[in-house]
Amino acid sequence: MTTEVAVPQTPVATNGAMLDKARANLRLACEQLNIHPDVFEELKSPRETLAVTLLIRMDDGCRRAFPAWRCRYNDRRGPTKGGVRFHPNVSLDEIQTLAFWMTFKCAVANLPFGGGKGGVCVDTKALSPTELERLSRAYIEAFSAFIGPDRDIMAPDMYTNGIVMAWMSDEYASITGEPLPTAITGKPIAFGGTAGRIDATARGGYFALRHLEASLTLDPAKATVAIQGFGNVGFHCAKLLHADGYRIIAVSDSGGAIHDPEGIDPLAVMEHKQQNGSILGAKGHGETREISNAELLELDCDVLVPAALERQITMENAGRIKARIILEMANGPVTPDADAALTAEGHIIVPDILANSGGVTVSHLEWVQNRSGFYWDGSRVRDHLKATMATETQAVWALHNEMDISMREAAYIHGLRRIAESVEARGTQAYFKGT
C-alpha cells in the first residue's frame, strides 16, 4: 500500500542545496555558449516529481513507512532514464539533483534519453531478503503509472542490484499484464539483461582514463591509484586498472580503508571482503595499514577515484588533496567550490557526467536489445562502450583545451549543446516574435 503526494513544481519545492549548485553549472555553461534563455528556463527545474510513502509489512508482522521518490527531470531528447537507490540518506533534493546530472550524462554520451532518478530512504542492511523484495515490489506498485519503456526507464543504483531489478521487472509485468523488459535495465541476463552491464560503469571510466593517458602523461607501469569505495564500481575499476599495470595503493569501504604503498591485489581484497564482510584486515604486497576514508582521499597518488558518495571532497579537505588526476566514478563527489579550487591549482578532474556514463551507455544497449529481441555478446558490448567513451572523452578534452576551461565545464557545454538543439528545434522566443 502507498500514499501519494504530488510535489508542486515551484522554486520552493525544488530548490535545495545540491540542486542550486547544479543549476550554477548550468547557468555558467549557458553563458559561455550564449545559449537562448528559453533553454535555461526549461532546464532549471524538473519536469515532474512524485513523492510517495511505501508501507511495508515486516517479517515480525509490524508495518513500516519508507519515503520514496521518482523524478523525471527533462525528456527533450527521449524518455527519461535513471537508477533507483536505496539509502538511508536519500532526500528529494538529492534525487532531483541526480536526475539533473543524468540529463546531462545522457546528452554527453549522445543517448536518446533524458534524465531521471528515484530513491527510497531505507537502510537495506537492516532488511531481510524478503523485506527487501517487498520494498522493491512496493516501489513499482507506487510508480507503475509514472515509469514505462517509452516514458521513464529505471536501472540499479546504490544498494540496488540485478535481483532487485528482476523483482521490479516482474512486478511491473504483473501490473501491466504483459512482459515489458524495456521498462527496467540492469536486469540479470536470464531476465533480459545484457552482457557487460555489471562492470559497465567502471569500464567506461577505465576507457576514459586510458584514452587520456597520453594527454595526461600517465604511465600505467608507474602510476599509483587510490580508490574510495569498493562496491561494484570501485572493485571493477580497481581490477581493470590493476590488470593494466596501475599500482592500486589504497581502497576503502564503509568500514574504513587499507593502504599499502607496495600495491594491493583487488581480487584478493574482494575475496577477503566476501569472507569477512569488510576489506579491513586484507593484506597487500608490503606493509598494509588501516586508515580512514578521509585519509585515503589525501594520499600521495597519481589518480584518485572517488567511487562512493557525493560531496566527499569539499573546501575543508581540498587543500590536502595530492592526486594530480581525479576520476569521478561516484556522482558529485567533488563540491563546486572544491572543484574550482582544485582546478585552479592544476588538478585534472574527469567529471562524473563523462567518467561514469558507461553504465547508462550499456543500459541503452540493454533497452535496444530488449526492443529488438536480438542480443549482443560481451565483446560487442565492450567494443561499443569503448568507441563511445573514446569519442565523447576526446570531444570533452578538445573543448577543455580549445576554451581553456575545466573538464567539468567542457562536459556541461558538450551536453548542453545537444540538449539546446532539441529545445530550440521546437521554437524559441525569437521564432515566435518573428525576429
Image (tube, grey):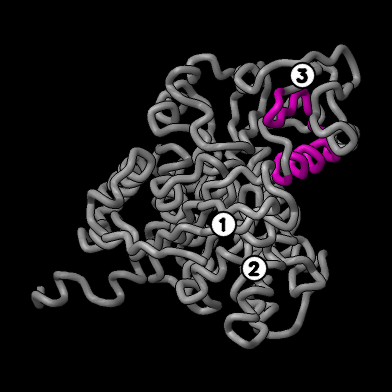
Q: Is residue 329 magenta?
A: no
Q: Mark 2: which amino acid?
A: Met
Q: Mark 1: which amino acid?
A: Val
Cα–Cα gap, marks 2 and 1: 11 Å
The quadrant the C terminus occupies is: bottom left
**Can you see residue 384?**
yes
For the record, the magenta segment spans 232-256
Label 1 neighbourhood size at 10 Å, few (<14), some (14-19), many (20+)? many
Q: Identify the secondary structure beneath mark 3.
A: strand
Cα–Cα gap, marks 1 and 3: 32 Å
The reply to whether callout 2 and callout 1 are in contact (CB within 8 Å) is yes
Question: Which residue is depicted at the point 67% across and 38% down?
Answer: 214
- Percent across and percent down for residue 282 are 86, 24
- 16 or 417, which is in the foreground? 16
Residue marked by disc 3: 259
Residue marked by disc 1: 84
- Percent across and percent down for residue 8 are 27, 60
Earlier sequence position, callout 1 versus callout 3: 1
Q: Is residue 235 magenta?
A: yes
In the image as oriented, which residue stretches furthest toward the front?
61
Q: Mark 3: which amino acid?
A: His
Q: Identify the secondary structure beneath mark 1.
A: strand
Label 3 neighbourhood size at 10 Å, few (<14), some (14-19), many (20+)? many
Q: Is residue 364 above or below residue 54?
A: below
Cα–Cα gap, marks 2 and 3: 39 Å
Residue marked by disc 2: 168
Direction from residue 218 to residue 119 in the image, left or right: left
Earlier sequence position, callout 2 versus callout 3: 2
